[in-house]
């Protein structure tokens, strides 16, 4: 159905960018009623909005509160769309295991990344905070279909723990079938390279895009 029919993808995109959860929910419900496909609403409306929000963040045009407001709006829209996507049997891109590394109890960034992964089409196994390498390995045994592990930290003191998680996963996955992503305030590309991670991203939007690139 063309964008000109009632609610447009642009309308939804703008409501997410502006951090208007009630407006996003209303527009998404109306869009579904008008026949727009749930997958298209996600990709052309909400994911595109978060991509632009991430770009503006990198350009220092908005800050963390703006990203969180947009994420809340996106969450409201996705809550409306999830039953539709499940009914349509939308294929999941893959499974991601996610956690904040041992020694760190921060979860705001991790939670935002988890939501972006889900919105991008992944099943997310969120292990929470203060997660050891043994817990990551146990989760991988429990969910053998996992294709990506994402490790987060906000503390410099917890970075050695991140290195240990990567080492343990590499030892258990000799064929390197599992992609490992790392992120968080103290993490850099140089550090990610030094510990053998497959990817480092600065924000949740980039993390979702990188994860998709590993699969698609």
Image (cartoon, helix red, strand yellow):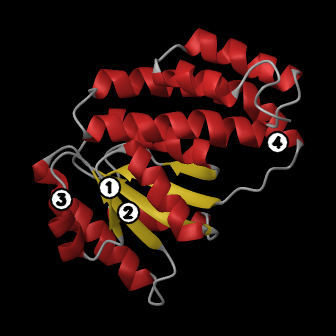
Say which label, 3 or 4, has the lower sequence index.
Answer: 4
- Residue 88 position, x and y percent, is 88, 44
Q: Is residue 185 above or below residue 196?
A: above
Quick check: marks 3 and 4 in contact, CB under 8 Å?
Answer: no
Say which label, 2 or 3, has the lower sequence index.
Answer: 2
Q: From the image, tell me which residue sits under label 1.
A: 201
Gap in Å between the C-alphas at discs 3 and 4?
A: 37 Å
Label 3 secondary element: loop
Q: From the image, tell me which residue sits under label 2.
A: 181
Q: Is residue 107 above or below residue 201?
A: above
Q: From the image, tell me which residue sits under label 4.
A: 86
Q: Is residue 85 above or below residue 23?
A: below
- Which circle, 2 or 1, is nearer the viewer? 1
* Disc marking residue 188: 3
Residue count near mark 3 (Cα–Cα under 10 Å), binned few <14, some 14–19, many ≥20: some
Quick check: marks 1 and 3 in contact, CB under 8 Å?
Answer: no
Extreme residue in the left direction: 157
The quadrant of the rendering that contains the N terminus is top right
- The part of the image, by quadrant, that contains residue 33 is top right
Residue visible at 50% across and 22% down in the picture: 72
């Amino acid at each position: 159905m063309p964008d000109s029919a009632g609610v447009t993808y642009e309308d939804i995109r703008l409501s997410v960018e502006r951090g208007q959860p009630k407006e996003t929910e209303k527009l998404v419900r109306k869009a579904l009623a008008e026949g727009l496909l749930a997958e298209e609403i996600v990709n052309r409306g909400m994911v595109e909005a978060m991509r632009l929000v991430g770009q503006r963040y990198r350009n220092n045009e908005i800050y963390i509160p703006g990203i969180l407001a947009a994420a809340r709006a996106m969450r409201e829209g996705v809550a409306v769309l999830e039953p539709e996507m499940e009914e349509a049997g939308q294929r999941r891109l893959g499974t991601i295991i996610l956690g904040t590394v041992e020694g760190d109890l921060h979860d705001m960034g991790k939670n935002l990344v988890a939501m972006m992964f889900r919105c991008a089409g992944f099943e997310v196994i969120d292990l929470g905070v203060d997660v050891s390498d043994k817990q990551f390995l146990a989760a991988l045994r429990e969910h053998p279909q996992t294709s990506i592990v994402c490790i987060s930290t906000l503390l410099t003191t917890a970075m050695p723990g991140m290195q240990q998680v990567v080492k343990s996963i590499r030892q258990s996955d000799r064929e390197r079938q599992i992609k490992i992503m790392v992120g968080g305030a103290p993490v850099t590309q140089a550090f990610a390279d030094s510990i053998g991670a497959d990817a480092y991203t600065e924000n949740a939007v980039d993390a979702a895009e990188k994860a998709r690139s590993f699969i698609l």
